[in-house]
Amino acid sequence: MNKVELEILKKIKPTKKEQEFVENFVNKLLKISAKVSKPFYAYPLIVGSIAKETWLSEDHDIDLFIVFRKKVKREKLEEHGLLIGTTICEKLKGIYNIKYAEHPYVRVKVNSSREIGKTNQITKKLTNKIVSNSAWKGLAPYFEIDVVPCYETGRGEKIISAVDRSPHHTLYIKENLIGYRVDHARLLKYFCKQIDVYGADAKHNGLSGYLCELLIINYGTFENTLKQISKLNFGEYIDIENITDEEEAKRKFKDALITIDPVDKNRNVASPLSSQNFLRLKLGADRYLKTKKFPVKKKITKNRLIEKLKENRGTNFVGIKFKPPEIIIENLYPQIRKLAKRLAKYLEEKDFPVIRYFSWTDEIKNAFIIFELENGMLSKFKKQEGPLIFSKEVNNFLTKYLENGYKIYIEENKFFIDTKRKFLNVEIAIKNFLKENKKEIPERIAEKKIRFFDEKEIIEEVNKNKELNSYLVKKYFEV
């Protein structure tokens, strides 16, 4: 490791005292979980970065899997999993939320300050530091525990639910990510966080912790991983265990990066990674290799952002806004993006050229889809191209348009007519879409009141909403 990497590692690697503190809590958690799970013939298992020892300092999220026998029916697995999770929460005197992935699970937040009395003063200071950096106001210091039910499967066996892979992922990493490579995995995770490409969830479309660990296993060190990433082309193929055929994999997976899961040859670990974030990763890796400066994550906002964009680009901004439906987050983001794509296509069809479009939500109160257009107003008529004068379609073309009163003219051996547009104003076009194209709107969003979002409102919202402002700054000014 070079000096820069050692300095970063010193910052992100848990100290011995922090490791002891987390380990003590995990042992307590396992003891309680084993007792609660026993009547259901299930057992607890810690997976994820805590189990793999690749977690970063102050990141105390714990993945606790409750492993059930395969003969347990799906509905019983879900029912008992929730019961076990809420009971564990009660015994730890925490609070919980029911979350949803492939099936429901329990997210528990535990105030770990109760554990401080069992630790020395150094650990107490450590946990106080965690309080100041915590985003979870009013409940700090804390542990966040996802209590997830899964089925027990052997290595190589067909999984029953998607989460059944996680114990095998943990075992694979523990067997193959050894020695100095553990710290190099930490560096790669932190690097991805700093350039904002970390997280395989639907909101972030980035790299998972597991993918970071696999890349280090494949390439050896943090620096060598960045060297290789900077050279990768879109659609590149990585198969650490050589368990698939490259041509077949590339036919099967149409993703920015293909990384075959060592425990499931039919899965691309990198499938959540968007093309844009793959580009950010490539360019970020190249920048680091040239400058040897570790990236610093910043949330940049700009005053009068939309006004300045209009001045510089001569464009118009319009959109729609609505309250996000109460659905799982993994479904919310794809549905909003799907609506944005459909509406952008509709505007293009109605002759409103879309330069850029964006979707953003705070997940609770507001969701916005914003379009940057070449122009929000159109002429009454547009020039429509017909067939060549030598085409067999000439008679049909003449019959159709002459009978309907169109004036036909020829330019350079091609027929043309001037047709009247249906929509001259983009606001009317968008409102028509919302009224007449409800089938194009995802069902749960269609249930909400969707309003037209005019340019004045967009300017006001972007000026006051720092999160939305920062999101748009990233889209316009960062790769």
Image (spheres, grey):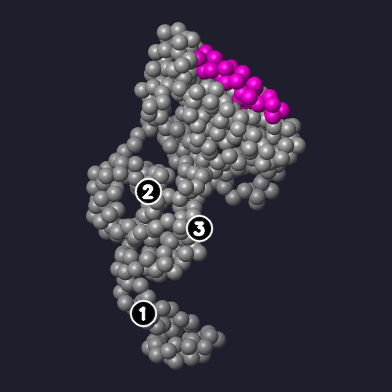
The mark total stands at 3
Tell me where the magenta segment starts and ends, as one range: 19-47
Residue drawn at (68%, 24%), measured in percent from left and top? 38
Residue 445 against residue 52 in the figure, above or below? below
Locate the C terminus by quadrant: top left
Residue 147 against residue 270 in the figure, above or below? above
Q: Secondary structure at mark 1?
A: strand
Residue 52 against residue 78 in the figure, above or below? above
Residue drawn at (39%, 54%), measured in percent from left and top? 322
Instruction: Indicate yes or no whether the magenta region holds residue 440.
Output: no
In this orientation, which residue lies closer to the viewer: 345 or 461?
A: 461
First in sequence: mark 1 vs mark 3: 1
Q: Mark yes or no: residue 297 visible.
A: yes
Residue drawn at (68%, 38%), measured in percent from left and top? 76
Q: Quadrant of residue 210?
A: top right
- Between marks 1 and 2 in the image, the one whose residue lies nearer the viewer: 2
First in sequence: mark 3 vs mark 2: 2
Q: CA distance from mark 3 to mark 2?
A: 17 Å
User: Picture coordinates of residue 453 (x, y %)?
Assistant: 32, 57
Amino acid tagged 3: Glu
Residue 47 against residue 31 in the figure, above or below? below
134 left or right of 263 in image: left
- Between marks 1 and 3 in the image, the one whose residue lies nearer the viewer: 3
Amino acid tagged 1: Lys
